[in-house]
Image: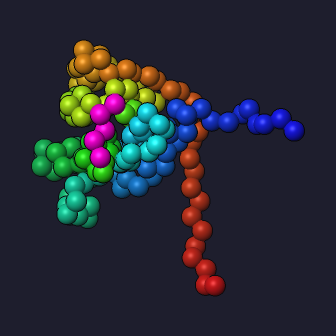
């Protein structure tokens, strides 16, 4: 019997892991996930967008509009940065898989950490100045950018706990 040939590519596989990580985000509007993988196709770290450790997601705002201190934007740590900061080892030379193209602040962390390749899916903010700056910095630093489209969508059905 011949082997299966309709398997996920490595990029599809690790983007699926980024999507799975995004399911941990409590952000009511945008859930982003990231996975960092080394040259041996080993997962080094994962992350999702959320508040820093010790900052309760019940006390800090999830709002998108209002005064700066009344919105999530000054408090939330993005998926890419969480994956970099939570890595148990240096990520230099690794590939970052992320479901949304990195912002300019995350681009700086990606470059400084030595990540060599970014694989992303959505580029919905491509026309914003922040994303244009991000792309300019990543390209200037020699970080390879690859867009992957039509990856698998993860739907999780929760099964209630049942007594055994």
Which residue is the extreme one toward the bottom? Answer: 164
Left or right position of 18 against 151: left
Q: Quadrant of residue 153?
A: top right
Name the foreground residue: 161 vs 95: 95
Query: In this rendering, does residue 39 appear at all?
Result: yes
Q: Position of residue 4 (x, y in %)?
A: 76, 36
Q: Quadrant of residue 79?
A: top left
Q: Residue at x 18, y 49 (%)?
A: 75
Q: Residue at x 30, y 51 (%)?
A: 88
- In this view, 78 is above or below 93: below
Q: Position of residue 78 (x, y in %)?
A: 28, 43
- In this view, 104 is above or below 84: above
Q: Position of residue 101 (x, y in %)?
A: 36, 30
Which residues make up the magenta segment? 89-93
Query: In this rendering, does residue 61 appear at all?
Result: no
Left or right position of 91 against 17: left
Q: Position of residue 128 (x, y in %)?
A: 27, 22
- In this view, 7 is above or below 160: above
């Amino acid at each position: 019997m011949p082997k299966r040939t309709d398997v996920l590519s490595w990029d599809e596989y690790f983007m699926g892991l980024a999507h799975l990580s995004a399911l941990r985000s409590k952000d009511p509007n945008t859930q982003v996930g990231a996975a960092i993988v080394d040259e041996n196709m080993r997962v080094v770290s994962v992350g999702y967008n959320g508040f820093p450790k010790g900052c309760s997601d019940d006390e800090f705002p999830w709002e998108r509009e209002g005064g700066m201190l009344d919105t999530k934007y000054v408090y939330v740590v993005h998926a890419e940065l969480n994956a970099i900061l939570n890595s148990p080892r240096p990520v230099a030379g690794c590939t970052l898989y992320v479901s949304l193209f990195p912002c300019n602040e995350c681009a700086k962390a990606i470059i400084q950490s030595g990540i060599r390749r970014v694989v992303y899916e959505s580029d919905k903010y491509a026309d914003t100045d922040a994303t244009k700056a991000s792309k300019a910095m990543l390209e200037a630093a020699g970080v390879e950018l690859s867009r992957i489209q039509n990856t698998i969508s993860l739907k999780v059905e929760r099964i209630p706990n049942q007594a055994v």
